[in-house]
Amino acid sequence: MVYLDHAATTPVLPAVVEAVAEAMAVGGNPSSVHSAGRAARSRIEEARELLAALLDAHPSEVLFTSGGTESDNLAVTGLFQARHRADPARREILLSGAEHHAVLDAADHLAATGAARIRRLPVDRNGRVTRDAFADAAAERPDRIALASVMWANNETGAVSDIAALSAIAGAAGFPLHTDAVQAVGTLDVDFARSSAAALSIAGHKLGGPGGTGLLLLRRDAALVPLQHGGGQERGLRSGTLNVAGAVGLAVAVEEAVTRRAVRAAEYARLGRRLIDGVRAIVPDAELTGSDPADQAQLPGVVHLRFPGCESETLLMLLDAAGVECSAGSACTAGVTRASHVLLAIGLDEPAARSSLRFSLGHTSSDADIDAVTAVIGEVVRRAKDANAKRTNARAQHVSPLLTGSPR
Ligand SMILES: Cc1ncc(COP(=O)(O)O)c(C=O)c1O
């Protein structure tokens, strides 16, 4: 199979498998005071220091979590509660409709309890929050804002926002900014100190690290109310016995991601360009969402294409049958396919949003993968268009009796 769904998850790196297996064989609870505990603690602290150095954070700013969803929930809920408790007039959460559900739903939950109010930030046609739009929002009653959350890079379109510029605006207006950098580390230069964000989320499995690992980088001066209560680990902000092997594996994955970043980004941009050109040479009406893969406001490894007259689910299944795994710009919930909230947020209509595919490149991607897609895409699109036309006809025949008042 050709795997072009690295933004969903990417294969674990061999060096990570080795490091995790070695750490698991040793054991020990890092909170214990005996030798085994101290040995586990020193592994955790080594991993923390390495991660801090790679991401330009202080070691005390590195909190280990179970992944992107937990980091996002902890940041949005914890920053909100700390700010709102300190000043009850601060109730607003600024975010765009293109955020990941881990951010959107955490904020929605706070709004449903009556504590928070959500203020939507507009996005451009690729899913970016622009500096001007953010500055306008921050200028409007900044004393009511508890926090903003803006993703560094969008997981569907690959659009990259200028987080350092947005953080500077948030800082000047007096509220913290959290950024979901789950898709950014690995191909973009993610420097926590330089970004000046108050908090930043990372997920291990997007980088070739172990599943169920992640980080929340939290600035030392950022107040945060914990979600989990218990043993007081991680400065009391994330209780729970630490996952030593996970932390060790995550550090190895981030080290490889950061040290190979520039080479990989250039390679993904080249492969991405080949993919776009190759597909459009065969399917001329295919439309690109986002910018050129070499554009600095675009993740080089994410190619999002729309195929007018096709349904993404059909394309996905036909490609899978032809040996290519990628992802649709839609989510299937309880058997009903719905257009992705991100694509609707950037202004696509339902049919356009439901005709898209996301190909995402990663450390195993090669020219052969691109050749495999271009070898089958013409036939796949032709069959998907046929299926869609038949479905539309069948629907028309089914509704016409109702429209004509037939008793059927
Ligand atoms: C941008 C973004 N944020 C958060 C998440 C959630 O991360 P995790 O799968 O580690 O919970 C994902 C994963 O799909 C993502 O792409």
Image (spheres, rainbow, N blue to C red):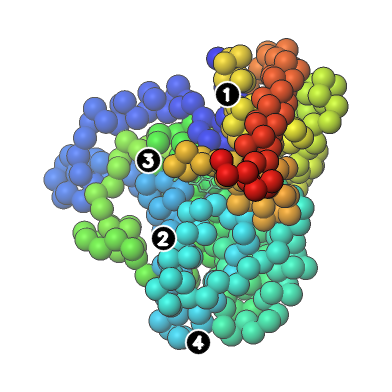
Q: Which residue is mark 1?
A: 317
Give residue 278's position: percent from left, percent from top. Answer: 80, 21
Q: Residues within 10 Å of mark 2 (few under 14, many from 20)?
A: many
Are discs 2 and 3 less than 8 Å apart at CB?
Answer: no
Kindly indicate whether the residue at mark 2 contacts the one at mark 4 (C-beta within 8 angstroms). no
At 43% from the left and 58% from the top, the residue drawn is 73
Q: Are marks 1 and 4 in contact (CB under 8 Å)?
A: no
Quadrant occupied by the C terminus: top right
Please name the amino acid that badge 4 sits on. Ala
Spatial separation of the CA atoms under disc 4 and disc 2: 21 Å
Residue tagged 2: 74
Query: Going from the N terminus, do you reach mark 2 or mark 3 first?
Result: 2
Vertical arrangement, residue 8 with respect to residue 139, above or below = above
On screen, 397 above or below 364? below
In the foreground, 81 or 279: 279
**Quadrant location of residue 366?**
top right
In the rendered structure, are the residues bearing label 3 and label 4 in contact, judged by CB atoms less than 8 Å apart?
no
Which residue is tagged 3?
Answer: 212
Label 3 neighbour load within 10 Å: few <14, some 14-19, many 20+: some
Tell me if 39 is positioned left or right of 351 in this view. Answer: left
Please state which of the two labelled residues, at mark 1 or mark 2, is closer to the viewer. 1
Which of labels 1 and 4 is toward the front?
Answer: 1
The residue carrying mark 1 has its beta carbon less than 8 Å from ligand 1: no
Label 2 SS: helix
Amino acid at pointer 2: Leu
Distance, label 1 to label 4, CA atoms, is: 50 Å
Q: Secondary structure at mark 1?
A: helix
Count of marks, rendered view: 4
